Image (spheres, rainbow, N blue to C red):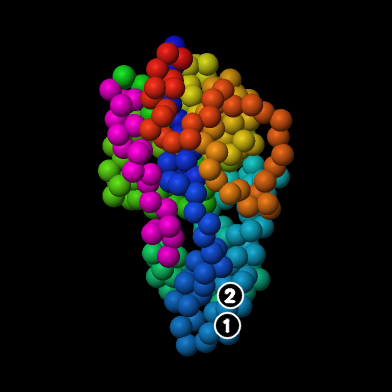
Amino acid sequence: MIDTVIFDWGGTLSPWATVDHLAGWRRVADVLHAQDPERAAALADALLAADGARWLRVRDEHRAFTLAEVLADTAAHHPADLPPDVLAAGMAAHWEYWRPHVPTDPEAAPMLAALRKRGLRLGVLSSTAWPAAWHEDLLRADGVLDLFDACVWTSDLEWTKPHPAAFHAAMAAVGATDPARCVYVGDRLYDDISGAKGVGMRAVHVPHSSIPAVQYVAVDVTPDAVVQRLADLPALIADW
Ligand SMILES: [Mg+2]
């Protein structure tokens, strides 16, 4: 009998969107070098490269990271380009850029409420560099944060999905003890489905994301089920 459902965030609770990452870093660079567009463009390229290098370590080693580490990696090569006194304003501009691209699926709140009504524990486990506060502000604004028992963001962990430690951290956060009684719902076969099944959870695939080729890892895994929309989940797992 299932007692816990844990969700991926990007591409699952928040529908997949293809976003111009360079433009997001350019917002930071424009705040830092408002009077010097060439310098801002070069810094945006460097920030994107540092971010991309960190995501490759996620793909290949499952090493978690934070935006602060992206900034530190960039500053190591461009020390004069990241003045600490304006960094907070720069990162605020980064968040303002991203925020409209990552709304919560309108089907999430009623679906989560239906699962809660059954007494299920609910959680989030997301591989992300963003601070927990950004994610939780977003979920709060969209009216779903209080529907979760706990949310785990890998910016607070050492490992990302599909590493077992990330899944175990999410189970511990929601108070789950038996992975066989947990369902994980996610959009990526490698990170989400193989990761969840690897620790003994059941796994439901939401197959609508255009995973970038650079992030794709081939894996031989079959989800326990596929849902085309979040609203279909409560009926699917009703007798699991
Ligand atoms: Mg995802």
For the residues labelled 2 and 1, the Cα–Cα distance comes to 6 Å
Q: Look at the numbered discs 2 and 1 and tell me whether their residues touch, using CB distance below 8 Å.
A: yes
- Tag 2's secondary structure? helix
Q: Nearer the viewer, residue 89 or 113?
A: 113
Drawn side of residue 120 relative to residue 215, left or right: left
Please state the horizontal and vertical placement of residue 97, each as a whole percent of the image: 42, 65
Q: Nearer the viewer, residue 236 or 37?
A: 236
Amino acid beneath label 1: Arg
Residue at the extreme front of the image, as rendered: 228
At 64% from the left and 36% from the top, the residue drawn is 190
Up/down of 12 relative to 173, above or below: below
Q: Residue 43, labelled with which disc?
A: 2
Drawn side of residue 151 relative to residue 222, left or right: left
Q: Main secondary structure of the magenta part?
A: helix
Please state the horizontal and vertical placement of residue 17, each as a whole percent of the image: 49, 54
At 67% from the left and 28% from the top, the residue drawn is 221
Please state the horizontal and vertical placement of residue 79, each as a whole percent of the image: 60, 74
Drawn side of residue 115 relative to residue 225, left or right: left
Instruction: Give the magenta-colored segment's residue range.
Output: 97-117
Quarter residue 62 falls in: top right
At 52% from the left and 72% from the top, the residue drawn is 26
Q: Which residue is mark 1?
A: 39
Amino acid beneath label 2: Leu
Q: Is residue 99 magenta?
A: yes
Quarter of the image that includes the N terminus: top left
